[in-house]
Image: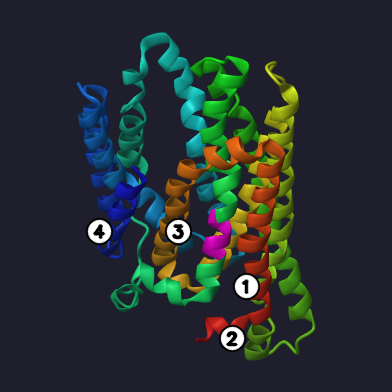
Amino acid sequence: MESGRKAGIGRLVGCALKNRRPVFLVSLVCSLVGNVGCAVSPSYGTMGLCRAITAFFISPASAIGSAVVAETFFKKERARYMGVWTTMVTLGVPMAPFIFGFVAVRVGYRWIFSQTNGVQLLLYFLVGRETLYLRRAAAAASLRPLAFVARPCVLLPAVGYAMVFLWANIMMSVETGQLFPENFGLNPQQVGLQNISIIVGSLLGEQIGGFLSDWWMWRRHAKVGSSSDGQGADKAARSPQPEFRLWLGYPGHLLTICGVVVYFVQIERAGTFWNITPDVGMAIAAGGNQIVTTVMTTYAVDCYREDAAGVGVFFNFVRQTWGFIGPFWFPDPIQRTGFRASAGIAAAMIVAVSMVPTAVVQWRRSRWRQD
């Protein structure tokens, strides 16, 4: 499904650079058709094909969401509403098993398909509006998304965010579904309830990643603005650089590491009897992940405001690539090295691939943005 989503992102971004609303509507209609196909599939192969179709057509929502936010809100409130969007992206993973665990236990797994797409289509048709009002010249000048691989102030935050998302969201969602039934004997509904911790943690983390991030930049702007002579050019030059926002990413990294360690260690301590302590680790990691998600995404959009759609596509391409690969190798280190060593591996990867690159971006500052 992830590979199909990446392909869908690449094909549809060109149309998305010109119009938003038609792309969203076509996306929802076609993904709804794919999900209906999943519900009536007679074989595993047929369902795999329908899932690929769904993944291809559902991609625009994650690809151009950042552009919609950038087009709709002013810079002073961008992090707050970018955080709302990124929170919804994050919550999609835990909300699905939380809600449809009840459905799978009571009426069967086939009923979990298509309902959500149907509601989305109805709501977006009734209240969704076009948000792209940029000049044609600006839209035509947009970069191809993969060109951001040569832009370190987008590449490094995207890679760092993807690593945090991998451990705090993908790993926990996948391994909870595998470890909790095996270790604690939980059924799908009970496993789905564990995702409440990710939902709560993400919502709490967003208060720092969104609201506090905007306040952080506003406070800096007020400080440097008051020290200028009041002239427009000087005041603009003394405005806080986008890299100042990245200071709020470090608490997110540390919370993610703390949460992953608690999750693994407490699963090992629990043995064969379930308790809530691993869920506490999930909530802590989810809060850290949401802080990093909002801060990194908003920073990259601040650097390339006119190419917000391309930034969103690139961020999701990197995240989906990491997310697709991760579940293939997660079980092996856990089985070979144990839970505590796996926690150490996760901490080392987050520090090396997320925290250190963030520090490098801050060190280089505007020199990369001017290249």
**Residue 54, quarter of picture:** top left
146 over 270 or under it: above or below: below
Label pair 1/3, CB-CB below 8 angstroms = no
Residue type highlighted by circle 1? Pro
Q: How would you rate the neighbour count of disc 3 (Cα within 10 Å): few for under 14, some for 14-19, many for 20 or more?
A: many
- As for residue 117 lying within the magenta part, the answer is no
In which quadrant of the rendered image does the N terminus lie?
top left
The residue under the point 41% across, 16% down is: 104
Residue type highlighted by circle 4? Arg
Pointer 1 residue: 242
Of tags 3 and 4, the one toward the viewer is 3
Q: Which mark is residue 367?
A: 2
- Calculate the distance from the C-alpha at mark 1 to the C-alpha at mark 2: 12 Å
| Magenta segment | 157-162
The residue under the point 36% across, 74% down is: 143
The residue under the point 35% across, 66% down is: 133
Of helix, strand and loop, which mostly describes the magenta segment?
Answer: helix
Q: Secondary structure at mark 2?
A: helix
177 over 207 or under it: above or below: above
The one of 224 and 254 positioned closer to us in this rendering? 254
The first of marks 1 and 3 along the sequence is 1
Q: Which mark is residue 11?
A: 4
